[in-house]
Image (cartoon, rainbow, N blue to C red):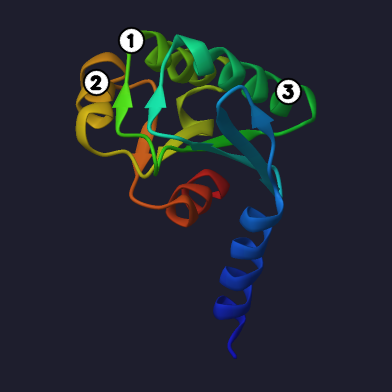
Amino acid sequence: MNTLAIRLLLTLALFVVAAFTVADEEISPTKIRSVQVIRVNGTDLTGLNGSALTSRINQAKQNGATGIVVDLGTVSHMTPAGMESLTTGAQSFGAGNFAVANLSGQPAQLAQNGGAGLFHTYSSVQEAVAALRE
């Protein structure tokens, strides 16, 4: 097995191991070197769970993360209050150190209108992590 395949398997294993339950949504962080990956599981990102996401982002910064990737792969609906957790995080870390992965549908449209220029979006977590490490 080549080195890239092994790294991908290890990264995948880290995602499976990390899990934090917050309210009805699961927000799980995984730290890959200095880039913290936070996965939001559930279909909605609203003010109700957006505050938990903001807390995880702030904790990551306090714990020494220099970059954040928020994985919204399961999120199909986002309110402006949910979007605010992303924009606040992006402002805290800076545009070059904050990214959103797996953004599609209605959340992508909202982010395009409300978050333009504040953070970059990527089609996968691995792509986002690689971009933040450069």
**In this rendering, position of residue 126 left or right of residue 121:** right
Q: Which residue is mark 3?
A: 59
The local secondary structure at tag 1 comes to: helix
| Contact flag, marks 2 and 1 (Cβ < 8 Å) | yes
Residue 117 on image: x %, y %: 32, 22
Disc 1 marks a residue whose amino acid type is Pro
Disc 2 marks a residue whose amino acid type is Leu
Of badges 3 and 1, nearer the viewer stands 1
Marks 2 and 3 sit apart, C-alpha to C-alpha, by 25 Å
Residue nearer the viewer, 42 or 84:
42
Residue in the image at 30% along x and 34% along y = 76
**Number of the label disc, if any, that sits on residue 72:** none
Disc 3 marks a residue whose amino acid type is Gln
Q: Earlier in the sequence, mark 3 or mark 1?
A: 3
Q: Which residue is mark 2?
A: 110
**In this rendering, position of residue 112 left or right of residue 85:** left
Residue in the image at 46% along x and 10% along y = 47
**In this rendering, position of residue 11 left or right of residue 109:** right
Q: Earlier in the sequence, mark 2 or mark 3?
A: 3
Residue in the image at 40% along x and 52% along y = 124
Residue 81 on image: x %, y %: 40, 8
Marks 2 and 1 sit apart, C-alpha to C-alpha, by 8 Å
The local secondary structure at tag 3 comes to: helix
Q: Is residue 93 above or below residue 67?
A: above
Marks 3 and 1 sit apart, C-alpha to C-alpha, by 22 Å
Q: Quadrant of residue 68?
A: top right
Residue 27 on image: x %, y %: 59, 33
Q: Which residue is mark 1?
A: 80
